[in-house]
Image (spheres, rainbow, N blue to C red):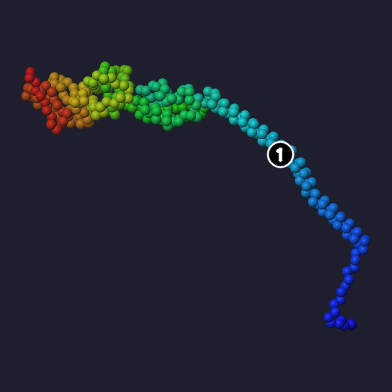
């Protein structure tokens, strides 16, 4: 083996490219460039093809959506016409249950339901309005399609007949004036000495009503009593004297006291001008000068 001398570097000379080699490389580069350019142009062609395919599909979708929306609007308009422009869902008559004193026509008029769409009916508001009638204690309203409304009422119950200014009125236990008495009936009549007229919904003395109700059972022969605010209830006794009873629910005690005084006065041969029992703890009477 030969040995190399230290410190000497062996150099190789670069061989110059021949004209053929240069031509091959340039042609290869040209071919590579053409191939690269062709590769770059492929996606553009693909995108163009996708767009050209998508355009008619998008148009089809738009036509289909427009048709569905148009059909929906037509159906909605038809439904609105049926619900609000025909008489099928409007209230022109109602059913009333539980009324005896207050007429169905009066309740219907007060309800405000005539000609109203069933969809605009507020049952609670109608019930409150009907319950505000003088003869109605409470009301319930039930609605059902297409246009049915049923009102169930609880009427106030008349307890006594209150007469004022020539008219007799049915009055409940709270002193509410209900309606005029159209047919003669039994029971105690309270003749109010006040001359001003009454109207349905007005209030009279509820304590006097309570006292009159008790007197009906205690003195069944009594058909009429008088009423004034200062003396309350009073009536003319068979002895020829006036008996003042006041008002309230203690009529049983007052009647007992009255009967005891009448027996005592009759036994002594005295004739009272009046007996005042408004204050049961201190009853008094005035003797007649006859």
- In the image, residue 47 sits, relative to residue 218, either above or below, namely below
Find numbered disc 1 in the image and state the secondary structure of the residue it sits on.
Answer: helix
Q: Nearer the viewer, residue 263 or 33?
A: 33
Residue at the extreme top of the image, as rendered: 166
**Residue 270 left/right relative to 5:** left
Residue 190 occupies quadrant: top left
- The residue sitting at 35% across, 29% down in the picture is 137
Return the x and y of residue 211 as percentages of the image width and height.
Answer: 23, 28
**Residue 271 left/right relative to 136:** left
Placement of the N terminus among the 4 image quadrants: bottom right
- The residue sitting at 26% across, 28% down in the picture is 206
Placement of the C terminus among the 4 image quadrants: top left
Return the x and y of residue 85 as percentages of the image width and height.
Answer: 55, 24
- The residue sitting at 47% across, 29% down in the picture is 121
Q: Nearer the viewer, residue 216 or 177?
A: 177
- The residue sitting at 42% across, 25% down in the picture is 111
- In the image, residue 165 sits, relative to residue 232, either above or below, namely above
Residue 243 occupies quadrant: top left
Residue under pointer 1: 58
Return the x and y of residue 36 as percentages of the image width and height.
Answer: 82, 54
Return the x and y of residue 15 as percentages of the image width and height.
Answer: 90, 68
Whether residue 223 is visible here, answered yes or no, is no
How many numbered tags mark residues here?
A: 1
**Residue 109 left/right relative to 277:** right
- In the image, residue 44 sits, relative to residue 87, either above or below, namely below
Circle 1 packing at 10 Å, graded few (<14), some (14-19), many (20+), is: few
Whether residue 98 is visible here, answered yes or no, is yes
């Amino acid at each position: 083996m030969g040995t190399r001398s230290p410190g000497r570097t062996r150099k190789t000379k670069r061989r110059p490219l021949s004209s053929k080699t240069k031509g091959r490389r340039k042609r290869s580069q040209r071919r590579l460039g053409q191939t690269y350019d062709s590769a770059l142009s492929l996606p553009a062609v693909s995108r163009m093809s996708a767009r050209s395919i998508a355009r008619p599909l998008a148009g089809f979708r738009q036509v289909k959506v427009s048709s569905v929306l148009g059909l929906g609007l037509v159906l909605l308009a038809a439904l609105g016409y049926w619900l609000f422009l025909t008489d099928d869902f409007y209230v022109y008559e109602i059913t009333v249950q539980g009324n005896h004193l207050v007429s169905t026509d009066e309740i219907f008029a007060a309800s405000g339901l005539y000609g109203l769409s069933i969809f605009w009916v507020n049952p609670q508001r109608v019930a409150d309005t009907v319950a505000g009638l003088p003869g109605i204690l409470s009301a319930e309203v039930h609605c059902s399609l297409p246009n049915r409304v049923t009102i169930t009422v609880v009427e106030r119950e008349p307890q006594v007949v209150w007469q004022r200014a020539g008219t007799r009125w049915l009055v409940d236990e709270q002193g509410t004036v209900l309606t005029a008495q159209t047919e003669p009936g039994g029971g105690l009549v309270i003749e109010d000495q006040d001359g001003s007229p009454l109207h349905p919904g007005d209030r009279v003395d509820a304590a006097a009503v309570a006292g009159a109700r008790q007197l009906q059972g205690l003195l069944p022969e009594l058909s009429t009593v008088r009423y004034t605010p200062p003396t309350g209830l009073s009536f003319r006794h068979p002895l020829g004297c006036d008996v003042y009873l006041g008002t309230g629910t203690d009529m049983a005690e007052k009647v007992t006291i009255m009967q005891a005084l009448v027996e005592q006065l009759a036994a002594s041969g005295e004739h009272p001008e009046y007996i005042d029992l408004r204050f049961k703890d201190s009853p008094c009477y005035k003797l007649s000068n006859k």
